[in-house]
Image (spheres, rainbow, N blue to C red):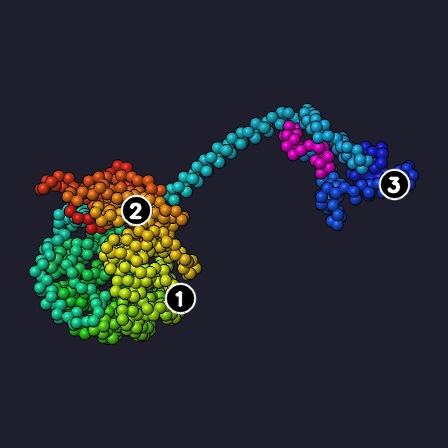
Amino acid sequence: MKCPKCGINLLDHIDVCPFCKTPIPKDAPAEETNAKAETSAETVVGQNTGRFSAIDTSKDSYDFDLQYTLTFRDSGEIKQAIADMDAGINRDLSKRKTDSDKKKSDEPRYTMEEMQEAALRAQERRERRKSGKKSVSHIERRKRNAMRAARPAKDYSADVSEERTQKSHRGLLIGAGVLVIVVALIVGIVNVCSYFTHKDPEYPTVYTKGNKLYSYYGGKELEVSSNFITIEYDASSDTDKSESKSSSSTSNKTTVSDPKIVEKTPLKEKELIKMSEDGTSMFFFENVNMNTRTGSLVYYKSGKKKSRVELAQNVYYDIVTDSNCSSVLFIKNADKDGAHGELCCWSVDKKEAITVDNDITAGNFKLSQDSLSATYIKNFNPSVHTGDLFYVSFAENAEPTKRVDEKVAFVFGTTPKSKIYFYAKNYDTKTGTYDLYIQSDVEGPKSIAEKGLLAPVISKKVESAYVFSNYSNKLQTLSCVDLSTGMNTKLSEEVTKIIKLRNDDGAVIYSKIYEEDKADYYYVSAKSPNPQKVASAINTKAVEDGIALFDASNDFSKIAYVGGYDSVNMRGALYTMAIINDYSGSEIRISDDAYCCDVSADGAVVRFASGYNAENNTVNLVSYSNSNTLALADEVGVGAFTFDKIGEYAIYAKDIDQTASVGKINSVNKKAKIKNLDEDVSAYGLKKDGMVLLLKKTGEGDAQTTSLCKAKLKGGKVKEFADNVTKVLFY
């Protein structure tokens, strides 16, 4: 039977054409038709395959073929949907058939005959299900599918198809080649950028050879001064120094040791050099008289010999520079105590020293953070430790130097924007306490704290400062002053001193001494003034001796400390703690035998020394990360090991020959892989750029020479770059 409209072949019992929806006239009696409908309805109720019906959502239908067809009725794809489904070909075979036919894109996917065959097969399956007959077995279906797949493909212009195939293959090859090149370029660029981004910049090595000063930078050794020290320190000058001390404020007997007043000690060579944070430039002294602490002040750009500029002669060693060493404040022609000198300023931009004022004492001047202004004390009276405060601007067309306050004891510096400067008034020489004042070029003096002992900690990132007040019985109040809003937030009332500042300056860790040599450490945030104890029973005497009993990551996310340290047995209990969202977690006890501890900058790795051996004077190095403890190295010389900041390596000396003062230098990474860097080394140092310096002595007596070498943390060949080295001052 055929459809009267579209002419497609239909089975005899079909009432409506599945393609054009034309009713098919029937000669059969109505009773028979109704009986068939009732039988079909009973069958539907009796079988439930669990498939969802897209037509009637109230029930499930087994006749998924029909539901699928009617669902796509309005999409214009009914013929293709029926053909895809009823052809009985699975997805893989359909792909093979499509690939093998190579039909043109504008031709129909199936012919009318194929569509008719698919429709007839679908009707036959429905009839078999309705009559209860078993459908075709899966074996027979696989055979039919295989026969259909094996039919020869129709020829649709074989030449054109072959040409398209060749072009497609050539395109694929060219595209693949281009893709490989692009990927290689991207990977190369990423690697190069990553290398330069993460590689630490080179830091100069400054050392002496006899009385000559050298700098090694960029693979070159340059002599920067031919006469570093002119007159060596004479111990007999201590008598003169004690006499001059009687005329100063320190001659008064005080009940406390004022940390703001620096007691004079013999001058060291390292104090004669000021290096920028990145090492690209420095100020240094030459022709130095170590007794009067004066010499010629010189500016030098690392690696550039012609950049050397002598600023002035007879300059007192106590100079003030900015972080980049591009500007400097200094006094010249002062007396042996650094008083009554001429205050001068020099900058790289102006390239000449200008006189600011006269009769100035060392330590009584500060450069602003932007280097465009300064505050200093004039007419200083050492008996009462006060003088007049002056403000000077170095900006273009600036106002003349002006006197801004009187009876000022100390100047502390400025905020990052350099608009506000800090200084001390009402200084008590007996207790060392003072009142903290602030002032700006647009606002007059204002007191923000009273009776503080320690100097304020001024932020270098935000307009704020941590200030002290109400000093009593070795404790004082700590507050945070936000100068952008004017808020003064009290953080704690029982503070000894600030131990560490968080990298964003938004929180601090401070100590509170409760016994003569014991202190607890607390964490407090400027935004959440709720102190939380993060370390207990820290031996302050051991800390003063240089033993690291406490450390924290840069962001304070990880804390490590050695509590209950026994100075006789050199050990204590090691604890770690996490701080998340300004809240400290629970302590985790890592070891009962810790000599010291270290936390990497990101807090991922905690390293410590343990197992102190008094007879051999050695310890063992251990790493703790991800709740796992790993032994790194054993029998390491006490005081002869260094942890890097990123937590990757540790440098240490072992097998130390006490007679010859030499030892073996090794590096060990976080996976406990040890590399021997060199042997018979007198001293070593881990540079800021990740290289390792090795000082080696060869020969004996007058024939002994000292060479300076460098090595990589990963080991390898050791390279000597300087000989006859006397002292290494900066690296």
Question: Which residues lie in the magenta part?
Answer: 80-103
Query: Along the horizontal axis of the image, is 206 left or right of 176?
Result: left
Q: CA distance from mark 3 to mark 1?
A: 86 Å
Q: Position of residue 702 (x, y in %)?
A: 9, 42
Most foreground residue, 130 or 367: 130
Residue 602 in percent (x, y) is at: 37, 52
Secondary structure of residue under mark 2: strand
Q: Residue at x 36, y 51 (%)?
A: 590
* Residue of label 2: 621
Main secondary-structure element of the magenta-colored stretch: helix
What residue do we see at 79% from left, 33% from top? 133
Above or below — where is 475 with respect to 175? below
Viewer-proximal residue among 505 and 574: 574
Q: Is residue 499 left or right of residue 617?
A: right
**Which of the labelled discs sits on residue 35, or is there none?**
3
Q: Residue at x 36, y 60 (%)?
A: 534
**Sequence-first disc among 3 and 1:** 3
Looking at the image, the residue that sits furthest to the left is 236
Is 341 magenta? The answer is no
CA distance for labels 3 and 2: 93 Å
Q: Nearer the viewer, residue 402 or 329?
A: 329
